[in-house]
Amino acid sequence: MIKIIAIDIDKTLLTSQNELAPATIKAVKAATAQGIKVVLCTGRPLIGVASFLTQLGLAAQDAEYVITFNGASVQTTSGQILAEEALDYADYTELEALARRLKLHFQIENNQRLYTANRDLGQYTIYESYLVAIPVSYRTPEEMREVLMPKGMFIDTPELITAALANKAEFAPFMQRFNFMRSAPFFLEVTRKNVNKGHAVAKLAEQLGLTAANVMAIGDQGNDLSMIEYAVTGVAMGNAIASVKAAAQQVTSDNDHDGVAQAIEKWALQ
């Protein structure tokens, strides 16, 4: 029996206009009425999902949950941290140096701000700030010692990100210590190696006395793959990448045709 529905946000829960469809809201509320925990799982900070939690009736509650920063933080929607694993300052200095060698913009994102040590802000840095409703702040590398770092982000044009990833020699020394997740053509997110959405969903399920058999996960991109693989009921969106569809047990409609609502109604509701 499904007791947790873990749902990615961008291009999964939301339409292409970054909105919640009425059918999605209705289906999520039907699930919560049956006692199912609907858990938004995202690379965003909590502030970046607050409006959606409010629309879904999940906001500011001690017994509803959200997974942020691609699994680096598991918390209640009221903001209580249940589990968190962040980058440290040594990690930051190495990743910042890597970004400068690759000529990419690099930022740290937490629940307060998007921090950058590059005065020349990139267009996609500004886009991320707008997307998740979080301010951008400049800090010198030395000042970054005081910043909580759940997630780093290489943010730049798709062409620059693709070219950087082709530089295997530069990335190879980092692959054993970090997860690099391309969550959008212009975002390359980085967390500690054991941080991912699947691990975070598993931690939450354990705390709630549940197992993978009680979990349905819905997603579309590479950073959703770990939770699709963890859940006994993994659901790929119709607009999902090929690897997510291959790992999923089910495929639903795309994000502009009520894919999440259809999945909840077919495979979760009693």
Image (spheres, helix red, strand yellow):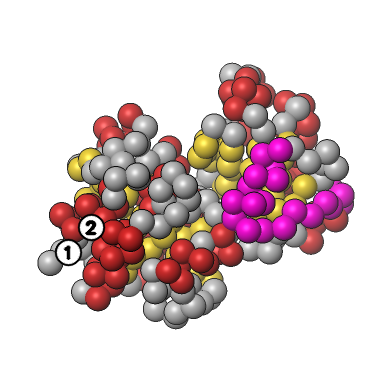
The magenta region covers 123-142
Q: Which image quadrant is residue 162 in?
A: top right
Say what secondary structure mark 2 lies in: helix
Q: Is residue 8 visible?
A: no
- What's the residue type where badge 1 is placed? Leu
Instruction: Say above or below: 207 vs 194.
Output: below
Q: Is residue 223 visible?
A: yes
Say what secondary structure mark 1 lies in: loop
**Closer to the camera in the image, 84 or 77:** 77
Q: Which label was assigned to residue 232? A: none
Identify the residue position indicated by label 1 in the image. 269
Looking at marks 2 and 1 on the same chain, the residue that comes earlier in the sequence is marked by 2
Q: Residues within 10 Å of mark 2 (few under 14, many from 20)?
A: many
Identify the residue position indicated by label 2 in the image. 264
- What's the residue type where badge 2 is placed? Ile
**Closer to the camera in the image, 59 or 64:** 59
Instruction: Say above or below: 172 vs 25.
Output: above
Residue positioned 87% across, 49% down in the render:
140
Check whether the beta carbons of the residues at disc 2 and disc 1 lie within 8 A of each other: yes
Q: Is residue 184 magenta?
A: no
Residue positioned 28% across, 59% down in the render:
23
